Amino acid sequence: MAGKKLRCRLGVHKWVLHHEPESGTRFYQCAHCGKDRSPDGALPPIGMG
C-alpha cells in the first residue's frame, strides 16, 4: 500500500480508456495504480483481480 499514490488510496483515480485489440473490449484503467473498471463505470466484482 505504501507504493500507491494518496489519490488512489482515497479512491480518486485517473481513469484512462484502453482498448483490447484481440477481443475488442474496452475498459478503464487508473494511470497511477492500474486498477480496472468497465467502460460503463462499474467496478469489476470483488475477487476479479
Image (cartoon, rainbow, N blue to C red):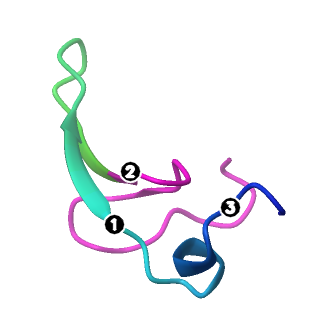
Q: Is residue 1 left or right of residue 10?
A: right
- The verdict on residue 41 being magenta is yes
Marks 1 and 3, how far apart at CA: 13 Å
- N-terminal of the pair, mark 2 or mark 1, is 1
Name the amino acid type tagged 3: Lys
Q: Residue 31 carries which label?
A: 2
- Front-most of 18 and 12? 12
Amino acid type of the residue that numbered disc 1 sits on in the rendered structure: Lys
Q: What element carries label 2?
A: loop
Q: Distance between the residues labelled 2 and 3?
A: 11 Å
Earlier along the polypeptide chain: callout 2 or callout 3? 3
Q: Where is residue 44 in the image (x, y as percent from the top left)?
A: 51, 62
Tag 2–tag 1 contact (CB < 8 Å) = yes
Q: In this picture, which residue range is highlighted in magenta?
A: 29-49
For numbered disc 3, what is the local secondary structure? Answer: loop
Residue 20's spot in the image, x, y percent? 24, 25
Which of the 4 image quarters holds residue 14? bottom left
